[in-house]
Image (cartoon, rainbow, N blue to C red):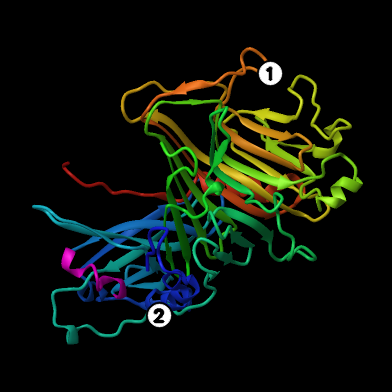
């Protein structure tokens, strides 16, 4: 079920009901005993052997795979119940695996077409390959000629509750709460840690994830979490994944269009995040930022009465990022603050804890005492112009800061002024109409280990997924 637009009735937003119904219509994790699939081809209109290759030296378990399948337009409403995914052990035997079908789409015209995305979670040994046989579509045969074929049984589904935009999502790794107004990630907890099950990462009651924000002084900052309700939103959910989309004009700068998509998976410790920003007319800006994580911290290095009055605490003790030699550098937040609470690092503007490359592979924050953390895993970013105009190139970076204002954060500026605050070079820049920025990344909720090995492994797995071995088509 999709629910689109800010005026959708709350009864149609009940994702816990959707998730329950999905268990009836989608295959889900089940028995792993091999079965005989000889002759199955005649019970489906189409089948295809989808081969995946592991090239990064990682044992892959529950890796999300998404494949677009086509079918006749007139079969689109009924085809969901006629799909099977089998991990082959031989040409005639294999193991049924869970799958989920995303919403289908049809295109009219002289050559009408229909398609929908198939999601399943793959397993593959390091430096190996695995083949999944995909069966789909209704064959040209009377309904009675098709036997009831086995399918995987529900187990270990993603847990979803609440109404859009304030959804709650759980798997064995995390519990995440979306903001009831904007739909941004408001709080997160790492599950399975002793004493940490109820710990939330808050930024003074605001969301911790800022997908995108723009600043055009003298006007105020404009963030996606400022939406009182997303202008447009929809969700697709099942036992394996929840995809939640928000899009529309920014709350205050109506000429700036924003889209943010969260995809949550069962059995996967990260959330996939895709974000775009488009400027529909020229705009004077001081900053354009994406991929920001903001968390509460004390106003000063040590606990004080004002901090207690504001109920502030240090959610994170350290920031960390990879160095070029492959090692991990950690910076203790409170070791670098002046008496007013601002970060103070030689060679950097007051307040900055680190100024890193915009495309640094990952950046993390963690608590050394509570042993939980959150990391941004970067896969790709894009800056271009759809109308042939110029693209601003001004101080793109990854910025880590603590100003003693009760929170610390990192962001991925697409545009920053090259001059420090208060200098002659601290100026607005002109952004052309048609400018488009996009990021593809993941948010990992992790348990702290020596060397942050979980973060490094998750980044490698996210950015070097199982490779599809394409046999080719043509002669196109």
| Mark 2 → mark 1, Cα distance in angstroms | 61 Å
Q: Is residue 80 magenta?
A: yes
Can you tell which mark lies on residue 422?
Answer: 1
Horizontal side of 181 relative to 452 (left or right) equals left
Foreground mark, 2 or 1, reads: 1
Q: What residue span does the magenta drawing correspond to?
A: 73-81
Q: Main secondary structure of the magenta part?
A: helix
Q: Which mark is residue 265?
A: none
Q: Quadrant of the C terminus?
A: top left
- In the image, 308: left or right of 419? right
Location of the N terminus by quadrant is bottom left
Q: Quadrant of residue 388?
A: top left
Instruction: Check disc 2: other Cα within 10 Å, few if <14, some if 14-19, many if 20+.
Output: some
Q: Is residue 194 above or below residue 318?
A: below
Residue 456 part of the magenta segment: no
As drawn, is 76 to the left or to the right of 208?
left
The earlier-in-sequence mark between 2 and 1 is 2
Q: Which disc number belongs to residue 24?
A: 2
For this orientation, the residue located farthest to the bottom is 144
């Amino acid at each position: 079920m999709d629910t689109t637009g800010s005026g959708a009735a709350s009864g149609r937003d009940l994702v816990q009901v959707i998730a329950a119904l999905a268990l009836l219509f989608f295959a889900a994790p089940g028995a792993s005993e091999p079965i005989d699939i000889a002759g199955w081809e005649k019970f489906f209109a189409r089948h295809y052997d989808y081969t995946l290759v592991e090239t990064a030296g990682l044992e892959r378990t529950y890796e999300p795979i998404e494949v677009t399948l086509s079918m006749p337009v007139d079969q689109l409403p009924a085809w969901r119940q006629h799909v099977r995914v089998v991990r082959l052990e031989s040409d005639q035997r294999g193991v049924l695996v869970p799958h989920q079908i995303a919403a289908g789409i049809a295109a009219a015209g002289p050559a009408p077409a229909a398609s929908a995305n198939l999601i399943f979670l793959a397993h593959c040994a390091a430096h190996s390959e695995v083949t999944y046989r995909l069966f789909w579509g209704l064959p040209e045969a009377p309904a009675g000629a098709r036997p009831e074929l086995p399918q995987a049984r529900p187990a270990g589904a993603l847990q979803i509750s609440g109404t859009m935009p304030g959804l709650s999502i759980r798997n064995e790794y995390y519990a995440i709460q979306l903001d009831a107004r904007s739909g941004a990630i408001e709080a997160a907890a790492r599950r399975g840690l002793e004493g940490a099950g109820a710990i939330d990462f808050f930024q003074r009651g605001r969301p911790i994830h800022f997908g995108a924000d723009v600043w055009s002084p003298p006007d105020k900052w404009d963030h996606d979490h400022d939406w009182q309700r997303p202008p447009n939103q929809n969700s697709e959910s099942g036992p394996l994944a929840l995809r939640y989309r928000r899009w529309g004009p920014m709350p205050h700068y109506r000429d700036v269009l924003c889209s943010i998509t969260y995809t949550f998976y069962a059995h996967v410790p990260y959330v996939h995040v895709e974000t775009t920003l488009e400027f529909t007319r020229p705009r004077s800006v001081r900053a354009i930022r994406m991929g920001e994580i903001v968390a509460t911290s004390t106003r000063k290095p040590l606990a004080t009465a004002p901090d207690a009055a504001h109920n502030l605490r240090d959610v994170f003790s350290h920031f960390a990022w990879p160095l070029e030699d492959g090692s991990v550098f950690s910076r203790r937040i409170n070791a670098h603050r002046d008496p007013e609470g601002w970060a103070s690092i030689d060679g950097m503007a007051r307040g900055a804890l680190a100024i890193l490359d915009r495309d640094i592979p990952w950046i993390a924050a963690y608590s050394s005492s509570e042993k939980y953390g959150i990391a941004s895993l970067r896969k790709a970013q894009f800056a271009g112009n759809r109308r042939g105009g110029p693209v601003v190139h001004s101080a793109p970076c990854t910025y880590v800061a603590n100003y003693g204002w009760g929170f610390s954060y990192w962001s991925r500026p697409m545009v920053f002024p090259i001059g420090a605050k208060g200098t002659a070079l601290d100026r607005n820049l002109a952004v052309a109409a048609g400018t488009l920025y996009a990021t593809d990344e993941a948010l990992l909720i992790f348990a702290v280990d020596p060397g942050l090995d979980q973060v490094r492994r998750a980044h490698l797995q996210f950015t070097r997924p199982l490779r599809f071995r394409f046999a080719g088509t043509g002669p196109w």
